[in-house]
Each structure stands twice: as structure tokens, then as C-alpha cells.
Image: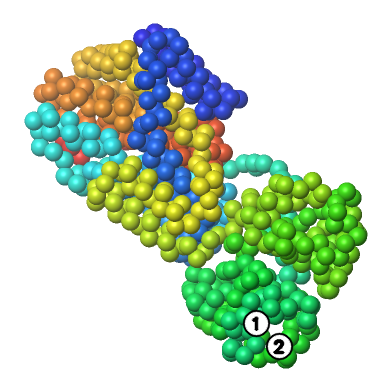
Amino acid sequence: MLFTFIVIVLTAAFFVWGRIRSDIVALCAMLLLMLSHTLTTEEALSGFSNNIVIMMAALFIVGGGIFQTGLAKMISTKILKLAGKSELKLFMLLMLVTAAIGSFVSNTGTVALMLPIVISLASAANTNPRRLLMPLAFASSMGGLMTLIGTPPNMIINSALINAGYEGLSFFSFLPVGLITLGIGLLFLWPATRLLVKETGNKDETKKKGKSLSELAHEYQLVENLHRIKISDDRHFAGKMLKDLDITQKYNITVIGVQSAAAAASRFQRRIIDQQIPGPETILRKDDVVFVFGDREDVEAFVQDTSIVLVDFTQTENEGFAKKEDMVFSQMGIAEVVLMSNSKMVDKKVRESDFRSRYNVTILGIQRNNEYILHDVKDAKMHAGDVLLAQGKWTDIAKMHDKEDSWVVIGEPMEQASKVPLSNKAPIAAAIMVLMVLAMTLNIVAPVTATLIAAVMMILTGCLRSVEAAYKTINWESIVMFAAMIPLSIAMEKTGASAMIAETIVSTLSPFGTLAVLAGIYLATMTLTMFISNTATAILFAPIAVGAAQTLGVNPTPFLFAVTVAASMCLASPFSTPPNALVMSAGRYTFMDYVKVGLPLQIIYAIVMILVLPLLFPF
């Protein structure tokens, strides 16, 4: 028992110190318990098979799908419109929406769903996400206190009440308590989160990783030289392959994208210029929209010689076309490639380089000595040190990055690709999200099953670019930290440390009256939850609370509510609840950030609840 207390103190000290990553600290604590034989190997590693841990990993993937498809941005835009330009309105609206969802969906699921939305929201509103992410986690816990199913401790105290022979709680018995916590949270967190706003990272960091897609598009005049043409009849193009048309040689323009008629009419695909990356054997159909890159005069000559239609980018979206300034890329990407002096491409013309046939990319422009070659590119000779603008599938550009030593691809192509939304998959992501929430709310399947199914569906339906991209969405630091802290809870129960703490507090305070015992149970639950999970703490203290009430001959309901509120609203620790752990890395929070903001709020809740609970549920 003493060794377990020493591990707890050391773990807390290293978390507060903050010089070592939280997941490494948690792993070291787990290893100490294992090496000391306090826990068996199976007990020490049990956290990695815990339902909540698996659920957290799956929800990261679901959140990644919501973010990658642009669904998060769509939802955040709606919220932003309601909030207007007021940061206070935005903060309040976010808290209320999160609490409302958290009333019916697990707080872990709520945060995972809202996390990508809040990040998009902060970016769009030019607000520091650190000021929103921690309140997001706290609001989900506040919402969990609104209903019986909101959080596991609620169901634990209801079960304890029934097992003791009392009438169970109703679905909305928790609502008054939840509203009080939410009201206090709204008033406290808005000014308190100013403590979290600080400069992070290097402003020049993005420059080191290469230019943004928007910067490249404007630098190489993609916006000015991109044109849409529509295949209007069957005479010249419909049903023919691109290689048979020889458009590039005849008219000096490059076909870089083909959008089918069905895609052009789709609401969710209007802003995507690259529904199909064309190849030599791409077949054109009637009413297809073809994106060509080249000089305006060459495009107009092409149009005059054929019966195709030049489509103006300024046409309204109701007609199914996007504006040039809204140009985005999903499967098609662009990247700069610096030609090395030892490259076999040096002194060759672009059309002789076979970039398209060998690497499936097209050279759209050349930068040489701060000058740009953007017209007749196919006939330009390439020199050592030239910067080539390559266009093609992100995966093909990435292959150039990985396989060749005769050029250098500037930036990280796949990292750039991950920032581009797969907007055509947004309806699928929305459907998966809604079905997951319904399955969890209606208890159709276990929550962990619902989240795993949703994660797999996000991958299989293409809401994430690949399985590798799905794995990259998982915040492994949070997962490992939470999984490695679970054995500490097991150690405290196994050695009797938890029971000793609880029983000592109750026996010591009972002579001072009922309210003192209530306060003792609340404070003990709150303190212990800072070191072990809130669910484990609720399981431990619920029977003690009932026993203390029965010893005093009073109603156990306020004692049990003290347990669930103290366990659920443990805000001063990143690993006491899954929501706190979920936002830790995304907000770049330290252990002390939680202490600075969460601990004062916890103390306020303790004072208020100790006084209010006996009024709501008389002894």
C-alpha cells in the first residue's frame, strides 16, 4: 500500500513538473507497479484493452473523417454565423451545444465529435483554440450531469441506490444539478480561459514546410490560366480518348481535370476541380466539364475550332460551377520540384521528359532565376536548379518524393493532401456520425461497438484517404497516457489504499454531523479522481456513501450525488476523465494548465454542491 502511495506522489510530481511527456510518465508508473509485483503483468496491461481506451482510439478516427471530409468546417460555419463576430457568443454557443449533446451521448463521444468542429471553428473565427478546447471537455462533463445516461458515474450511483433497496432515479433527476454546474461553468470559464492563451510555436514554421496550395496556385497563375470547357455534342470529342485528340500539341493547352456531368451537378462536389485525374486513355463524355490549363488566347482558339463551350467561372453555384478563387484540390495535387544537376532531365524539353508517362504528373510551370515560364512549357528546356510545378495525384507526387534522388520535392505532399477536404464524402461522414450517435443514444449496441463500426466505415467509404491516414488521426499520447493510468486505479483497489482513504474520512467526520460527512465524501471523491478514473472512483465511493447515510439514518441520495458530481467534474487533471485526455494534445495543454483553470472551478463546485445538494435532495 505504501509503495502505491509513493508511485502516486511521484507520478503527480512529474506531471506537475511537465518536462517529461505525460504518456512516458504514465508508462513509468505502470512499469513500477509491474516490477514491484504490486500488479500482475495482465493487470498492468489491462488498460490497453479497456473499452474506453479502444473507444477513444476509434473516436479519433471518426473525428478525423469528420474533419477530412470538410463536414467539421460546414458545421462550424453554421455555428459561426449564429455567433456573429462576438467571441463571447461563440464561446457560450459552443458550451451550450456541447452540453446538450453530452446529455444524451457519452462525454467521450461528444468531445470526439466536437473536437474537429471546434478546431475548424477556432481557425475560421481567428480565435486561439486553447481557449475553446478545454471548455469543450468541461462542457461535455457538465452535459453528462443532465441525464441518467450522460456519464458512467450517474448509472453507478443509480445502481447503488437500487441495490440498497431504495427507489431508482428518473432519467432527468440529474437535470437541476447539471444546469447548476453548466451555469457556473459558463460564468467562470470565459474569463478563466484567458490564462490559457499564449503564443505557441514559431510563426515561420509553416514556411519551412513549403508554400501553401493557395500560394502556389497564385504564384504560378493557376487561377488566371485555368479554364473550364464543356463537351456539348458528340461530333468532336464525346466517346473519344484524350490520346487520340492530341489537344496539347495542337492548341498548347493541358488537360488537368475531368468532371463528369453528374459530379458537376452535385451540391457537395461543386468546389472540386478534379473529380478524375485524366490519363491518355480517359474517355470524354457529352456534358463532361474539362479543366484545361493554358493561355486564354489558346483556349479561345480551341473553342472556336470546335463545338465545345467555354464555361465562365463567374457563373453562380446554382448552375453547378465554382468560382476560380474557390479553387481547391482533393485527389489532384500540386508541388514544387527542384531539379538537381545530376538529373537526366537537365537540358531536355519538358515534352521529352516523359514525366506524364513515367510518373503520371504534368509540369505546369517553371521558375528560373525568379522568373516564371508559364506558356509553351512543353517546349521549354529544363536546367539544373529549375523549380518545376508538378501536378497530379497526391500519391504520385509522393512517389516522386520517395523514389528519386535527381530532384527534391519541396514540402510534404501527403501532409498538404491531408489538409484538403474530401468534400464529396461529407454526406457519407454525416450519415456515419448520425448513425453512431443514434446507436449510442438508443443503446442498440455497446458504445465501443458503435464507435468501432463508425471508424471502420469512415475508412471503407473513403472519408479518410487511407488506412495510414486513419491511424495518423489517433492521438497516441492521449491513448497511451490514459491506458497506462488505469493500472494505478487497480493498484489502489487491490492494495486497499482506496478503501482505507474512504473509510477513514467517513469515520473521522461522522461526529461532526451529516453535512460534514457529505463534504468529506465529496472532497475525498474529488481528490481521488485526480489520480484514478472517475468511473473507478464512483464504483469505490458509491457503496461507502450509501453505508455512511444508513449509519447516520438519513437519505443516501445527496451523498450519492456528491459522489457523481465530484467524480464527473474532476477538472484539475488531464487523465481523470477521457474528455480531458482527448483535448490535451490538440490544445497543447500541460498538466499545470488543467490545475490553473480546473482546480479553482472544482473548488467552486465543491462549495456550491455541498450547500445545494441537501436542498435539492433533503437528508
- SS class of the residue under badge 1? strand
The residue at 19%/46% (across/down) is 171
Classify 590 as above or below 221. Answer: above
What kind of residue is marked 2?
Val
Instruction: Report the disc number at residue 508.
Output: none
Query: Camera-side residue: 276 or 192?
Result: 276
Q: Tell which of 556 and 584 is nearer to you.
A: 584
Question: Closest to the observer: 156 or 71?
Answer: 71
Q: Residue furthest left?
A: 165
Among numbered discs 1 and 2, the one appearing first in the sequence: 1
Q: Which residue is mark 1?
A: 229
Mark 2: secondary structure:
helix
Q: Position of residue 400 (x, y in %)?
A: 72, 52
- As drawn, the label of residue 303 is 2
Tag 1 and tag 2, C-beta contact below 8 Å: yes
Give how far apart the Cα atoms at labels 1 and 2 are: 8 Å
Q: Quadrant of the N terminus?
A: top left
Task: Tell me if 516 is positioned left or right of 478 in this view.
Answer: left
Q: Amino acid at mark 1?
A: Ile
